[in-house]
Amino acid sequence: MVFPSTTELLGIIKQQTKYYESYYSNEGSPPPDHYSSPQANERKLPADIELARQAAREACIQLYELLSTPTDILMDVAPASTRVMAVDFIYTHRIGYDLGWGDKITYRELAEARGLDEDDVRRMLRLSMAWLLFDETDDGMVVHTAPSFALATNTGLSAWIGIMTKENWPSMLKMSEAVVKYPGSQEQMESAYAMAHHLVEPLFQTWEKDPKRIKRFTKGMEFIHATFGAQPLDVLQGYESPDNAIPTLVDIGGSKGHVSIGLAHAHPKWKFIVQDLAQTIAVGEKELPEQLKDRVHFMVHDFWMEQPVKAADVYFFRLIFHDWSDKYSIRILRNLIPALKKGAKVIICDTCLPDKNAVSPYQQRQHRGKDIIMKSFSNGKERDATDWAALFKGADSRFEFLGVRLPPGSELIWGGEEAIIEAVWSPSSEDV
Ligand SMILES: C[S@@+](CC[C@H](N)C(=O)[O-])C[C@H]1O[C@@H](n2cnc3c(N)ncnc32)[C@H](O)[C@@H]1O
């Protein structure tokens, strides 16, 4: 891979930042910073401006790394881990979760409200401030910055941070041990996560017995979908029923139905059946908007069992297969077969890894990071286009692989573009 020079990177930064800033200067205001209001920071930018912002950000990181010595690169691990610690501290103790934007509070009040030592809180928050979370006023009071306010008030973002620090972080530190103990394992119970959390049964069953974890996970998944997900419209693009029949989509492992709900709004003719484990389905049923109750249904179904909904038009899986190794992913696909009618579509929304040299090392970092997080989590994996084709072929030759497409706008999804991976059930006439 050819890396841009410092001069080229400076050129990119200058050009892209100027373009990004032009959007604000046309409106007569500067771009927001970490101290600007939440409204200014949460504003959704037009696609071209957002792309310019991302390009400038990536070039800045590349420039920073180009100006780093080999020792610098390695020594950066220490501050990076203190950032995780600071975020975990705030999340764990809900520091500032009831502090309004612009409100001030003393360290003592923060500590007393959480039953913590004042000096511990001061030191942890001064570390957090160095990472742009909270600020201290001239008179020694604590106030929010835009990032700390976002963590405190965006329940989905907060849940996602909790998943990262409480669930993932301990398992990442077990990874090196797991690959020695269980080399090349495809088993969930042999994952770094299982080791770190001392699992006695598979993780989804473990979570099922812990309503707080289920709530955090469903909330976090909903946030990821709303913030980085492929737009529901694109998933069913080209699938409108030609004959006025009411088509059905089965959303397998659909959590609390956030994707099906989005799809239901976009496709008023379709019916949706969301399947998941019992606790998750209970959350979904409780939260389902009244006006969708006739078209979005929930069903407890374990995808290790045969699919009970026969002859649906689409069997949909979002962010399911990356949780599982090939051995288990093939099992999930095979459990569909008795239910499939000729022409039924299997639509998967998941990552499709780009070629190693097709994207910058910075973007590779996101993709490869996700791949190894899935390994540490459950010995799952992210797949490239060849892997996806092989998965369907390995499940059954009657799955005709239709390919992978990236929905419009996926280039805006930083490091996490969700591909749409499709197959059609095509038995030969003797098989039908
Ligand atoms: C990574 S989440 C994806 C959720 C949702 N599809 C989304 O895109 O936000 C995986 C989902 O699979 C569900 N799941 C795990 N094991 C399952 C099983 N054996 N049968 C059905 N669902 C299961 C989990 O409860 C969870 O909701």
Image (cartoon, grey):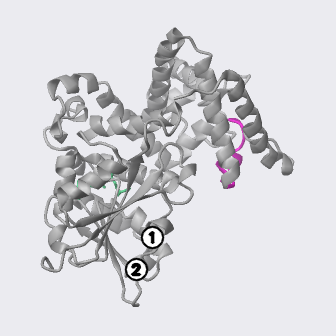
Q: Is residue 232 left or right of residue 130?
A: left
Q: Residue at x 15, y 25 (%)?
A: 181
Q: Position of residue 325 (x, y in %)?
A: 22, 45
Q: Toward which corner of the image does residue 129 lie, by quadrant?
A: top right
161 relative position to 306: left or right = right
Q: Quadrant of the C terminus?
A: bottom left
The crowding category of the residue bearing disc 1, from other C-alpha atoms within 10 Å (few below 14, some 14 to 19, many at least 20), is many
Task: Report the amino acid beneath label 2.
Answer: Trp
- Quickly name the residue at label 1: 263
Left or right, 32 with reference to 363? right
- Please give the residue where the numbered disc 2 appears in the rendered image: 270
Above or below, 129 relative to 377? above
In the rendered image, residue 201, in percent from the top left (x then y), is placed at: 14, 42
Residue type of the residue flagged with mark 1: Leu
Residue 358 placed where, x, y %?
49, 40
Who is closer to the viewer here, 302 or 184?
Answer: 184
Ligand 1 occupies quarter? bottom left
Q: In the rendered structure, are the residues bearing label 1 and label 2 in contact, judged by CB atoms less than 8 Å apart? A: yes
Mark 1 secondary-structure assignment: helix
Residue occupying image coordinates x 53% and y 18%: 123
Task: Read off the magenta span.
Answer: 33-46
Q: Secondary structure at mark 2?
A: loop
